[in-house]
Image (cartoon, helix red, strand yellow):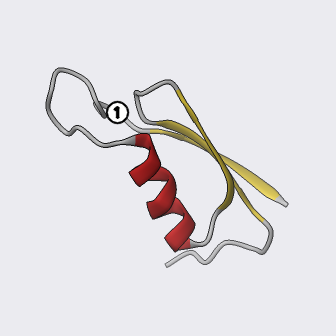
Amino acid sequence: MTVFIGLLRAVNVGGTARRAMADLKASCHEIGFGDKATYVQIGNIVLSLSKSPLIR
């Protein structure tokens, strides 16, 4: 299993680019990531992937 850490800049800061963490988790699920965990409301997320990632 591969673990990724996403550090998204300027998510839910200052009233612009607002996004619910549940929506962020759902988007990551659609891409194929599992075991999603967000940290506070600033867009940091830890993801896992059981198969090798598809890089385009």
State the residue position of label 1: 9
Where residue 2 sits, quadrant-wise, is bottom right
Q: Can you say whether 38 is above or below 41 in the image?
A: below
Q: Residue 3 at x, y = what percent?
A: 74, 50
Q: Quick one: which residue is furthest to the top in this view? A: 14
Number of marks present in the image shown: 1
Of residues 49 and 38, which is closer to you in this image? 38
Q: Quadrant of the N terminus?
A: bottom right
Instruction: Name the side, left or right, on which 37 lies relative to 6.
Output: right
Instruction: Name the side, left or right, on which 36 lies relative to 40.
Output: right
- Residue at image point 56% right, 40% down: 45
Of residues 4 and 19, which is closer to you in this image? 19
Q: Residue 27 at x, y = what percent?
A: 44, 62
Where residue 13 sits, quadrant-wise, is top left
Q: Can you say whether 45 is above or below 55 in the image?
A: above
- Residue at image point 15% right, 26% down: 15
Q: Residue 22 at x, y = what percent?
A: 45, 48
Q: Quick one: which residue is furthest to the right in this view? A: 1
- Residue at image point 75% right, 74% down: 52
Q: Amino acid at mark 1?
A: Arg
* Disc 1 residue crowd, few under 14, some 14–19, many 20+, Cα 10 Å: few
Numbered disc 1: secondary structure: loop
Q: Residue 17 at x, y = what percent?
A: 19, 39
Instruction: Name the side, left or right, on which 12 lies relative to 52.
Output: left
Q: Can you say whether 36 is above or below 9 in the image?
A: below
